[in-house]
Amino acid sequence: MNQIEQAGQDKASTNALLQKAVALHQEGKLSDANAIYESILQSEPGHFDALQLLGAIAVQTQNYERAIAILSQVLKLQPNYVPALNNYGIALHELKQFEQALVNYQQAIALAPNYAHAHFNLANTLYELKYFDRALASYQQAIAIWPNYSQAHCNRGNALQKLSRFDQALAAYELSISIEPACALNHFNRGKLLERLNRLEEALVSYQRALELDSEFEFLPGIIAHMKMQLCDWQDFDHHLQLVRQKNGRLEKATLPFGFLALIDAPSEHLQCAQTYANTKFPENHKLGLIPKRNKKSKIRIGYFSADFRTHALLTLICEMLELHNKNLFEIIAFSCGPKDNSSMRLRASQAFDQFIDIDNLSDTQAAQLARQLEIDIAVDLSGHTNFTRPGIFALRAAPIQVNYLGFAGTMGADYVDYIVADPVLIPQSAQVHFSEKVVYLPHTYQANDRKNTIADRLFTRSELGLPEHAFVFCSFNAPYKILPDTFASWMRILGKVPGSVLWLIQAAPSVKKHLRQEAAKHGIEANRLVFAPRMGMAEHLSRHRQADLFLDTFPYTAHTTASNALWVGLPVLTLMGQSFASRVGASLLNAIHLPELITHSMAQYESLAIELASNLDKLGAIRSKLAAHRSCTPLFDTPLFTQHLEQAYRQMYDRYQADLAPDHIYVHSLNSIANPLGDID
């Protein structure tokens, strides 16, 4: 056989192998196809088709570093090969190299203007860069080329949602579902929008359908459990709880950290959940490199990052603290993301800062670069793992010192967050192992409070509020998701032991009222003993607290702002203290106002004390008098003192950094002589 014949046979053999590999590839047998492509390349290192298809498999299997290496070779061979440009862009996008990804997609589109996938991928990258109008235009271009492009319709809905065009977004999701009803992501995104629109029952249906279609859909079991908690729909509650805990225990993507805080009092499980979430969604990113060490300066620059500089519980707590910062020693800059309003609270907050910067339309990289350019010394995440937040900015290292404070009642589970602000009640020393951060111990309570929160002069009557005139009124103005079946059962036992008493709750979705009244009936409690308070302005809401007798805290996610509100008005709060951060906030606040007698340590003790206080009005009256006296002479509402303690904490963090010392636990000493009634609780 001559050389020409041999070459022909070899080529035929290679082509046969390639066709077999392509068939396997199309069948989804990626490992088998990968092996054949590699075999071809061993005998023919420059085989173009085998090389570019090997790169495609690397993208499909999410091995993006490998994809970059392979596709770089492909593009050296054929710089204008459109599928390789597209796949190279996908790999760059997934590695968060968004600007470079744009270049590849734009080059692919210039070569193939009708390549719908390139328009779609370009839109995805524009979306990540917060260019929502441009992303929308690119999604629409992809759809114009391919009208039944389900993913493009779905992601177009995401862009419309970011632009607050909610009706159009919902229509886009509906269209994506009509094209591809078996796609779990289409149903999930519809559910997210419906949840944002407070159409919770419909959102739950969409989430459940998504999980039916994809039992491994990331974080969805916990999202469904949290949605059911928002509706107080406790059917199969134990099943959902155990499912989430088991998956979390196996390090699976079981739930979002925020919802999990209210499900279980288990700080070790909270840490595991937060670590899984942070590693999945916001892994540490070194693309910006190290922050150069700067000389020590007399004025420390603090960057406060939050999605809640608006009418929000967080801002009602911190606004006065922001105003009281010592501007001779600290410069404070707001980095605002998330929904905006024109409220007086947002205006007041903006005036408290030296600079107020809206970063909503900046990418994480751009926001982190801005913080670095402004030479922020300490970046404080006020929102943590809650709605509309941007942990990705912290993953890029926005400042040499990064802090988790107030907005999220637990650990971030991320090594790039150096400190969490707490107090000895919230995180006993024995619990430090359950936090990825080092703990900063403020001396009294971690929670700032605002003495400027006005209580309306209007004096409501009980009849105006739908309350019986002479009954004992228990109240709990916590959000419905904090009410677990065991907590509600406890409340019903309390009502059963206090004749004629009522439970006053905050108004929520209609189904919440229905579900809670159904549950009450199961405990033999009449429906009219649950009274629901309609939402109203904050000043009036504070005023109506006066018509309640005792605030019953939830467990394991206790009251935060709602407890401060009650105590500010003079309404005693009864709490049950558990093991987790979220379950100890009520105790922290009561400790700071020197009312440790309202902190209980078991459900039986909690119920017993509630019944005793409802039956012994003299004892309750003495507690109310003590609360009124302590309001102005204990640390809880001493905002100037609190601010000084927080500034001391910042100074100690900064001094450690300047001394080239790694973050460590920090204990801030009290600037007054009042001791904590409970000391260092364990």
Image (cartoon, rainbow, N blue to C red):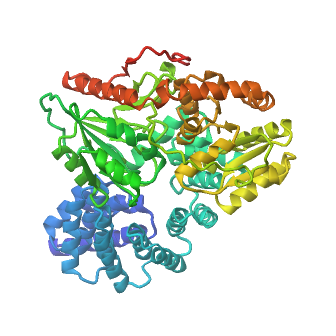
Above or below, 300 against 386 in this view is above
> Which is more toward the observer, 646 or 86?
646
Is residue 45 visible in this depiction of the protein? no
Above or below, 575 against 342 in this view is above
Is residue 103 visible in this depiction of the protein? yes
**How many numbered tags mark residues here?**
0
Which quarter of the rendered picture does the C terminus lie within?
A: top right
Q: Residue at x 59, y 60 (%)?
A: 211
Which quarter of the rendered picture does the N terminus lie within?
A: bottom left
> Which is more toward the observer, 426 or 599?
599
Q: Is residue 402 left or right of residue 162?
A: left
Quadrant for residue 164, please give it.
bottom left
Quadrant for residue 554, please give it.
top right
Residue 668 position in % (x across, y down): 37, 20
Residue 28 position in % (x across, y down): 45, 66
Above or below, 11 against 594 in this view is below
> Which is more toward the observer, 233 or 322?
322
Residue 77 position in % (x across, y down): 14, 67
Residue 519 position in % (x across, y down): 79, 50
> Which is more toward the observer, 204 or 569?
569
Q: Is residue 638 left or right of residue 571?
A: left
